Image (cartoon, helix red, strand yellow):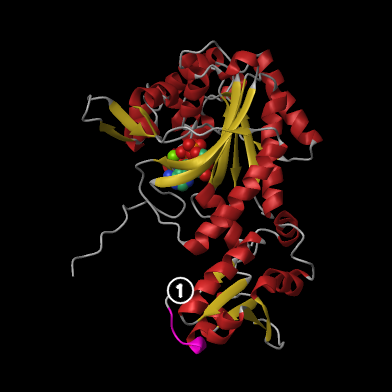
Amino acid sequence: MSQIIQAIRGMNDILPNDAELWEEFEALVRDWLSAYGYRPIRMPLVEATPLFARAIGEVTDIVEKEMYSFTDSLNDDSLTLRPEGTASCVRAVLQHNLLYDGPKKLWYMGPMFRHERPQKGRYRQFHQVGVEALGLAGPDIDAEQILMCARLWDDMGLEGIRLEINSLGNLEERQDHRKALIDYLTQHESLLDADARRRLHSNPLRILDTKNPDMQDIVEQAPKLMDYLGEASLKHYEGVQALLKNAGIHARLNPRLVRGLDYYNLTVFEWVTDQLGAQGTVCAGGRYDGLVSQLGGKPAPACGFAMGIERLLALWTDQGYQHEKPSPDVYLVHQGEAAQAAAFKVAERLRDAAFAVQLHCGGGSFKSQMKRADASGAILAVIIGDDEAVAGEVSIKPLRESGEQRRIAADDAAIAVSEFILGTDASSDADNKRNEHGSV
Ligand code: ATP
Ligand code: MG
């Protein structure tokens, strides 16, 4: 036999047990976002490469070494699998002129692609929920985005995710700081590692983010961006802090917090946990007032964040969350040709009444079918043999509690199942049942 082809390293299958957990999370996320007035948007997974180079920055890790880029053989265009969603989202907003009638609050969810070294919490295809507010300038939206994250952690029952915030000021302030930083780092060039030397003139701010223990001292003493912020930037930062305090959210002010993407200014934030090892940032974001004009639009302020779904779900299950495994209401057992025809009809009737029905497929003895019925977790077995088929009847047998098997007219199956499961009359409409019974 030839070898089985494997999935690409760092790109994971999400198998049914996990996929159900994902769907639960996604349902939670939809409700949560609509409660804050965000509307969904869906962008393509592939974009023109220059979009990311222009938005994220030429000398960022993402653009320098993490993008899956390829040439479209039809026209030689350079295309890229999206490494993040903000650039695409802003592109879509501009392309369709969505800001013509005022600010927009948008969200999306889906796969992102980065060519990184796969490890726990770091994958090559990973998934994000992204949230973007465009056209809003004040610290109020920054603060609301942060506190809405806190509510999601709460909704999920997650604990131990702490908030770090910082302000990156405006462009001019960053440039003044950058000059001072380059001067300082140049004076200490002999102490810099290769990575830092490479970034010294291209992206010195990122050097402050180094994980190299030998460089912590020099980084600690470096000029702080905070000392270069002007009045307006400080006021914005204080505004965010005041609103967070008012909402009872504790933020650690981290003057060394920078982001790996160039488009950020003013507020930046991260939600971090110690419980996931090295990959502890579950959500990150901030303000990116320059990006809309950078991508060719009329200047508009913006603020957003993205959370890593894999990391959040790992934390959710690590902290003991177990999702409910769905099982059918009814398992339909049948034997013989006439019984099979009747079973197909009865199954559809039950589904009309909004019950989840697993119709046995593949034949086999009653005994083996009943084993399957038990294993399915169904509440009831509905059984149709030759006798029942001829008489236009079905037998109903409780599977999860003791109770007699009883025979009823096939036409009454939905009512009988309803009485058993819900204690109500199935003639009430299917929507009713759905509401009462959840979406099993
Ligand atoms: P990191 O510092 O962990 O590389 P980042 O700054 O590159 O993160 P962002 O681009 O801000 O991350 O993405 C937002 C979130 O998406 C991260 O906080 C993280 O939860 C998640 N994320 C980013 N890259 C990956 C990846 N390769 N695998 C899994 N999740 C990721
Ligand atoms: Mg990264």
Residue at screen point 77% across, 30% down: 243
Dominant SS of magenta comes to loop
Q: Residue 431's spot in the image, x, y percent?
A: 72, 54
Q: Amino acid at mark 1?
A: Cys
In the rendered view of the protein, which quadrant contains the N terminus? bottom left
Ligand 2, by image quadrant, is top left
Q: Is residue 216 visible?
A: no
Q: Toward which corner of the image does residue 112 lie, by quadrant?
A: top left
Question: Horizontally, is 36 left or right of 190 in the view?
Answer: right
Give the answer, above or below, for where 265 lies relative to 330: above
Image coordinates of residue 62 in percent, x first then y, are 39, 34
Would residue 12 be counted in the magenta stretch? Answer: no
Which sits in the foreground, 241 or 421?
421
Q: Nearer the viewer, residue 438 or 199?
A: 438
Quick one: SS at disc 1?
A: loop
Q: Residue 250: which quarter of the image? A: top right
The span shown in magenta is: 363-367
- The residue that disc 1 covers is 361
Q: Quadrant of the C terminus?
A: bottom right
358 on left or right of 3: right
CA neighbours of label 1 inside 10 A, class few (<14), some (14 to 19), many (20+): few
In this view of the protein, can residue 254 be seen by the observer? Answer: yes
Residue 380 image position (x, y, % from top left): 64, 77
In the image, residue 414 above or below residue 76? below
Which residue is drawn at the image coordinates 46% and 87% (left, top)? 365
Residue at image point 49% right, 49% down? 279
Residue found farthest to the left: 1
Left or right placement of residue 387 versus residue 242 in this view: left
Q: Position of residue 198 (x, y in %)?
A: 33, 29
